[in-house]
Image (cartoon, helix red, strand yellow):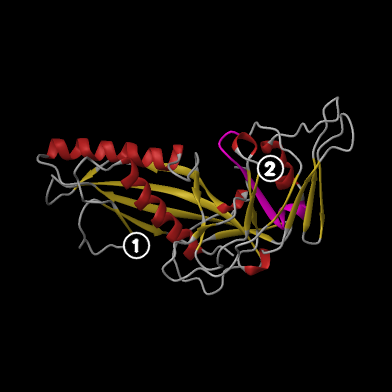
Amino acid sequence: MRTPVDALRSLQRYFGEGLHSIDAPEGDQRRWRAEIAKTDGRFKRPQVNIALVDTAAFADRPAGRVDYRRPVTVQAFCREAETPHDAMLEGMRVEHLLERLLLDGVGDGRPNRIPLHDFTDGRAAAATTGEGTHELRWAAVEHGVAGNGIEVRLEAPTGPDEPLTVARDDLVVTVTLAGDPAGEPASSAGEVADAIADDDDASALVVAEPGDDATGLCAPEVVALAGGGAIAPDEPAQPAARRPFDFMRVDDVTIGPPIADPQERRLVMVPATFFVMWSRRGLLLEGTTTQATVTLRSDPR
C-alpha cells in the first residue's frame, strides 16, 4: 500500500541520489542532500527541498484501485559561486540536471517516471526466470510473507502457431508460450511481461519485469517466489513491485529560471514544479496530514 508519505520519501530519495550521481565534481565532498519541506534556510548547499502542495485529487478506478494526483514543488539550492555571473551559470547547469531527472530519468527512473518505493509493507517475494535477453524478474504484488510460495510456470506451446496465453489458479500463474510454425517457443521476455500486465487475474498476484533487452525468447521453466518478509530498520526500503502504478508519473513540468538570492547574488536557487500521479489498491489515505496534490494513475510505463 503506497501512501503520500511513501511518495514524498521516494521523491526525497530520487532527487538526493539522482542529483549526486550525475553531479559529483571530482574531489567535491559536498554531496547533494534532499530534505522534505525544509524552509528555515539553515542548511549547507547543495541541497534540494521538496514539498507537496495543495490537496490531493483522487478518483476511483476498476479493480479496487484509487488514482491520486498531487502537485510538487522543488527548490534546488546550488553551490556557491565566485561571482554573480558564475552563480547564474551554475543555476542554469542545475536547471539542466533537474530536466534530466524529471524528463529523461536517472538510475531506476524512466522518462517522466519516478520510482515509487514502499517503506512500510516489507520485502516482496521474488524469483527470476531465464537470463540475458530472456531474463524476467518476478515479484509478488503483496509485499511480505504472503507472496512466498507463489508459483510461476512458463510452459511449452501446445502446438504450432498457437498464441501466448496467461492463466491463474489460486497462487499459480501459468504462461503458455506462443508457438512458431514448428511448435517451438516464440514468446519474448517483453511479450510475456506485457501479457502478465494485461491479465487482470495474474497481474493482481505477480508482476514481471524484463531486463534492458527483452527480445530473447523464453524457455519452459517453473519457479517459486521466495524471500518475502519484514525489512529491518536499518535496511534500505525495497522498490515497489514494477507495476505501472509503482512508478509515479510526472506531468506539467516547469523548471527554472534560476533565481538569485537578493541578499547575496553569488547564491542561486532553481525552482521546479510538477504533478505526480500514482495508483493504489484498497482504502483511501489513512490519516494523511501532508499538503500536496498527487494523482495516482494506472498508466502504462
Across and down, in percent, residue 108 comes to 48, 46
Viewer-closest of 173 and 46:
173
Q: Is residue 100 visible?
A: yes
Asked if the stretch drawn in magenta spans residue 203, the answer is: yes
C-alpha span from label 2 to label 1: 38 Å
Q: Is residue 284 above or below residue 29?
A: below
Residue at left offset 44%, top offset 44%: 107
Q: Is residue 283 visible?
A: no
Question: Amino acid type of disc 1?
Answer: Ala
Viewer-closest of 297 and 199:
199
Q: Quadrant of the C terminus?
A: top right
Label 2 residue SS: helix
Which residue bears the numbered disc 1? 37
Callout 2: few (<14), some (14-19), or many (20+) C-alpha neighbours within 10 Å? some
Residue at left offset 34%, top offset 39%: 97
Viewer-closest of 124 and 183:
183
- Residue ranking furthest to the bottom: 287
In the picture provided, is 276 more to the left or to the right than 262? right
Across and down, in percent, residue 279 comes to 61, 56
Question: Amino acid type of disc 2?
Answer: Ala
Across and down, in percent, residue 185 comes to 78, 33
Label 1 residue SS: loop
Residue at left offset 65%, top offset 58%: 140
Across and down, in percent, residue 94 comes to 29, 40
Viewer-closest of 131 and 259:
131
The region drawn magenta spans 200-213
Q: Quadrant of the N terminus?
A: bottom right
Earlier in the chain: of badge 2 and badge 1, it is 1
Which labelled disc corresponds to residue 292? none
Which residue bears the numbered disc 2? 193
- In this figure, what is the number of numbered marks? 2
Asked if the stretch drawn in magenta spans residue 279, the answer is: no
